[in-house]
Image (tube, coloured by chain):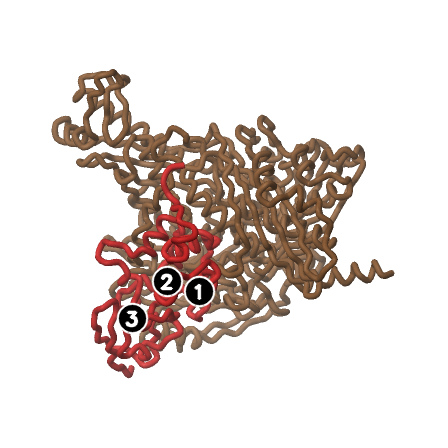
Chain colours: A red, B brown
């Protein structure tokens, strides 16, 4: 089979991989051990395979790996700083926004892409941005709350935290 | 406050960090050296015999390591339903067969070095079919002369194969006919429900390999590791001891994984190829080759007195299980046994036929027969209350089952056999009704006159109940041992499929032992390591597995106190556990830490503190739920928009209220999908028409109405720390509550699901024509 070389940065580390021209970014990332990139539908409908490509949220099942040449990719594995979780990861845990956790990596990265551009996103913006991330467990309420906990808008307007004893 | 330290606390999920960091925790998150890709050749016909099948070209393709057809595998009749042995579902399924019974049925399977080679190999298999007439309408299945779908002689436990009847039920308490004779008002209506698909985000996936002892290891996305082990062993004719099932993190199940679905064929390919094999459904395959909710036609009749007292109910159900009878009688049994007894009617009759059709196979799905039944019952009750001029809230308060009542229908309808009577020992339903009604501003909104504009709003309600485990049948066990640092290892057969069982069970253990949650390390769902558990279904895990954990932890605590008594020189009954230590109850409050106790026990006493316990209940305490919906109907388009859904649930004690709320919100979202958008459609040849997320619409964050979630906690004597269950019951309410709200808004009754805009528009137009005439 014909192969080509792919050079890209994943989670801050430069990578040189052999790929086939038709390989999808989803498959290549999983093959290379980035299992946080989930295979949910392979047709760009569910958002479970979301990664940030040069800061932009993409469904990695809809992107040829070759297209990522020279790009910076962020997967969920690269979000925490060592053992220090990203505020979004903390918020998802505090709010109970994680159930089975299969959609969670995509959700968190989608939320990060939103907040990186619109740090003050309100509920409508959050719901719009999260609409591309299907979740079958939560009903989205706690997911939206978690993202709002991190947005400056949310911190101003509803700053009660979940968790703790009743 | 409940006086507990860990129970009732919104602790973070014990598996949370690995989930938010994307750690490789799921079935498919492994690379196994030499792993092959399995693929199933699916039948393109709804009903056909395989006349000739030639696999030579597929076998000759480089990279192909195994090709299996019915000629290559043992023929062992079985059910794929992950139920306790002996399963009540018919044994009508074969690993591979010479007949196919729905579009998507297995024809052959291959294992190859890459996914694309496997896909190519599948296309190289030549099959000649003798195409038989399909059965694609429920009503046609029992008709004289209908094609017999299971004409094979070796299937067993089929009620009447010549008439395509997989199962039949008839149960009565009191005398329904007599009850109707005393009634002042009798209403009878027909309802239709459809095929909803689980659509869990992680499709079914299984990886099998032979370990260094040549045992078959099955790493799989299952809710039922133990049933799966037993079934695979039987189908592949292996001793159970040669099979090891591992359940990693699971990306949602909702009943769809209470099924031995890929494990048998993946295991067979592994044995044939002598290499590790993975099979994963694509999303498209997941829609029609996995399971779905049983479509039903329900005829519901109720008789009431003028004052609204319910006297008699009679429910007749015609359901289809599709091509195979997985969960056929048990799901449909629930449609009667968990639904009718919501009302204290002295007379109830339930009749049901579950028929085979050549359509995708139905199975267990959150709610397990109740969403269909409650849609009929609660829509009919709303109509009855309306005709009597009684507020539905008052009608429910007057008629619902209450504390101390005995539900006798459950005694007649067990899991495929006689059941056990249900005694109501905890019931927060009246408070559920009142609090959810208040949340939606019911008195004001229900009294409001419907508007006259294009967009009209209305409110509706429904009450529902479920069970907590299968009485006398579901059971679980747990094992605990103490580590040198005073922590405890907890092993449970229970299967966390995403709902948070590992967290809740750890909380129960920590509470019982008087330690903080970080002192409990849990392993669940591994048949080599953890003790038996029937699995995650029937809302059983918290009450049954939790009961086992509490018992095991109590036994271990007794051992801890025994060792501590030597260190503190006090008899065990004068000691108490708490704050990761044991202290004396006397005023001196001397204490010794759990770590010191563990070290002393292990190195001085030469004694491993450890114990296990088993647990089952002879009753299935119902959780209760009240659902209130506010909708807006567009009278020009028929579009129904849910504005607010208020759900109040009595789960007994909520071990972790935040997780419990999450269960409610997830369930009502699936319930709304069931009510409004989700239907797996088939064309005239039985082929799926919308097997993808663009055409099969599940709700997204943007589509959601306002959700109000209320927990009405009660104390259930049979549950650990008073807990019952929560994950299923809230799915039952949205469909009837929304249908009733639509009636309130625009005055038309919708009795068919899902409630599509075109159907609403059609009945609105019919009503306008009637009014004009």
Tell me which chain the residue with mark 3 is part of. A
Name of the residue lying farthest toward the left: B604
Taking A134 as reference, is B434 left or right? right
Q: Quadrant of residue B413?
A: top right
Q: Is residue B148 above or below residue B467?
A: below
Residue B243 in percent (x, y) is at 33, 50
Q: Secondary structure at mark 1?
A: helix
Which disc number belongs to residue B327?
none
- Marks 3 and 1, how far apart in space? 19 Å
| Marks 2, 1: nearer the viewer | 2
Q: Nearer the viewer, residue B490 or B642?
A: B642
- Marked residue nearer the N-terminal end (2 or 1): 2
Q: Quadrant of residue A105?
A: bottom left
Q: Is residue B674 above or below residue B505?
A: below
Q: Quadrant of the C terminus of chain B?
A: bottom right
- Marks 2 and 1, how far apart in space? 13 Å
Name of the residue lying farthest toward the front: A156
User: Dot 1 surroundings within 10 Å: few (below 14), some, or many (20 or more)?
Assistant: many
Asked whether the viewer can see residue B263, the reply is: no
| Marks 3, 2: nearer the viewer | 2
Taking B698 as reference, is A18 left or right? left
- Residue that badge 2 annotates: A119
* Residue drawn where x is 68% and y is 47% of the image: B379
- Residue that badge 3 annotates: A73
- Marked residue nearer the N-terminal end (3 or 2): 3
- Residue that badge 1 annotates: A129
């Amino acid at each position: 089979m014909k192969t080509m070389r792919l050079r890209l940065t994943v989670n801050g580390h430069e990578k040189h991989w052999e790929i086939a021209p038709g390989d999808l970014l989803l498959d290549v990332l999983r093959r290379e051990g980035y299992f946080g990139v989930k295979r949910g539908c392979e047709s760009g409908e569910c958002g479970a395979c979301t990664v940030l490509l040069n800061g932009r949220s993409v469904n990695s099942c809809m992107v040829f790996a070759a297209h990522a040449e020279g790009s910076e990719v962020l997967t969920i594995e690269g979000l925490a700083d060592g053992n220090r979780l990203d505020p979004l990861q903390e918020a998802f845990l505090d709010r109970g926004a994680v159930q089975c956790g299969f959609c969670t990596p995509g959700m968190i990265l989608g939320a990060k892409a939103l907040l990186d551009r619109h740090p003050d996103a309100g509920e409508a913006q959050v719901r719009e941005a999260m609409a591309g991330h299907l979740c079958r467990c939560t009903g989205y309420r706690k997911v939206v709350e978690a993202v709002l906990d991190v947005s400056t808008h949310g911190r101003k307007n509803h700053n009660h935290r979940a968790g703790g004893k009743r | 406050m409940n006086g507990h330290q860990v129970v009732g606390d919104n602790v973070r999920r014990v598996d949370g960090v690995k989930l938010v960091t994307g750690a490789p925790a799921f079935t498919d998150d492994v690379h196994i050296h030499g792993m092959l890709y399995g693929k199933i050749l699916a039948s393109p016909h709804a009903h056909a015999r395989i006349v000739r099948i030639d696999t030579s070209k597929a076998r000759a393709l480089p990279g192909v390591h195994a090709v299996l057809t019915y000629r290559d595998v043992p023929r062992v009749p079985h059910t794929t339903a992950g139920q306790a042995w002996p399963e009540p579902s018919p044994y009508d399924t074969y690993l591979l067969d010479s007949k196919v019974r729905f579009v998507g049925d297995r024809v052959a399977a291959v294992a190859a070095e890459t996914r694309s080679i496997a896909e190519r190999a599948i296309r190289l298999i030549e099959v000649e079919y003798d195409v038989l007439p399909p059965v694609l309408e429920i009503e046609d299945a029992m008709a004289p002369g209908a094609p017999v779908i299971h004409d094979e002689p070796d299937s067993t436990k089929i009620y009447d194969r010549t008439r395509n009847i997989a199962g039949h039920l008839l149960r009565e308490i009191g005398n329904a006919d007599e009850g109707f004779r005393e009634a002042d008002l009798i209403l009878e209506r027909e309802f239709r429900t459809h095929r909803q698909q689980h659509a869990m985000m992680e499709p079914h996936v299984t990886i099998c390999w032979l370990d260094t002892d040549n045992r078959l290891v099955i790493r799989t996305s299952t809710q039922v590791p133990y049933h799966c082990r037993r079934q695979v062993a039987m189908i592949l004719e292996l001793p159970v001891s040669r099979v090891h099932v591992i359940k990693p993190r699971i990306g949602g199940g909702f009943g769809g994984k209470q099924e031995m679905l890929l494990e048998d064929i993946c295991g067979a390919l592994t044995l044939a190829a002598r290499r590790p094999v993975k099979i994963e459904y694509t999303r498209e395959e997941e829609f029609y080759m996995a399971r779905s909710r049983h479509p039903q036609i329900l005829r519901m009749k109720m008789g009431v007195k003028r004052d609204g007292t319910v006297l008699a109910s009679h429910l007749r159900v015609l359901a289809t299980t599709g091509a195979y009878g997985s969960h056929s009688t048990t799901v449909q049994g629930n449609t009667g046994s968990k639904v009718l007894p919501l009302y204290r009617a002295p007379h109830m009759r339930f009749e049901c036929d579950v028929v085979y059709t050549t359509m995708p196979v139905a199975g267990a799905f959150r709610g397990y027969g109740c969403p269909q039944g409650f849609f009929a019952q609660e829509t009919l009750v709303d109509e009855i209350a309306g005709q009597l001029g009684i507020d539905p809230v008052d009608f429910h308060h007057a008629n619902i089952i209450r504390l101390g009542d005995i539900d006798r229908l459950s005694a007649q309808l067990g899991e495929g056999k006689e059941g056990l009577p249900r005694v109501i020992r905890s019931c927060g339903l009246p408070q559920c009704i009142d609090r959810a009604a208040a949340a939606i501003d019911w008195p004001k909104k229900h009294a409001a006159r419907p508007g006259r504009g294009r967009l009209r709003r209305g409110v509706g309600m429904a009450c529902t109940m479920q069970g907590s485990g299968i009485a006398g049948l579901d059971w679980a066990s747990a094992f605990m041992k103490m580590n040198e640092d005073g922590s405890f290892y907890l092993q449970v057969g229970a299967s966390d499929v995403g709902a948070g069982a590992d967290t809740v069970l750890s909380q129960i253990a920590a509470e019982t032992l008087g330690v903080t949650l970080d002192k409990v390390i849990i392993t669940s769902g591994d048949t080599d390591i953890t003790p038996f558990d029937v699995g995650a279904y029937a809302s059983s895990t918290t009450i049954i597995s939790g009961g086992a954990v509490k018992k095991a932890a109590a036994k271990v605590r007794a051992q801890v106190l025994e060792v501590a008594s030597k260190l503190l020189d006090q008899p065990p009954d004068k000691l108490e556990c708490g704050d990761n230590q044991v202290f004396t109850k006397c005023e001196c409050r001397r204490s010794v830490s759990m770590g010191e106790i563990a070290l002393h026990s292990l190195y001085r006493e030469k004694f491993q503190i450890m114990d296990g316990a088993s647990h089952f209940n002879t009753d299935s305490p119902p959780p209760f739920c009240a659902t209130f919906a506010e909708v807006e109907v567009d009278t020009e388009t028929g579009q129904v928009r849910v504005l607010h859904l208020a759900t109040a649930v009595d789960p007994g004690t909520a071990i972790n209220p935040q997780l419990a709320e999450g269960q409610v919100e997830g369930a009502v979202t699936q319930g709304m999908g069931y009510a409004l958008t989700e239907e797996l459609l088939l064309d005239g040849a039985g082929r799926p028409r919308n097997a993808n997320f663009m055409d099969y619409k599940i709700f997204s964050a943007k589509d959601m109405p306002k959700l109000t979630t209320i927990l009405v906690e009660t104390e259930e004597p049979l549950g650990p720390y008073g807990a019952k269950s929560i994950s299923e019951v809230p799915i039952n309410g949205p469909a009837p509550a929304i249908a009733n709200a639509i009636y309130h808004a625009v005055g038309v009754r919708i009795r068919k699901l899902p409630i599509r805009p075109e159907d609403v528009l059609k009945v609105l137009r019919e009503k306008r024509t009637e009014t004009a005439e």
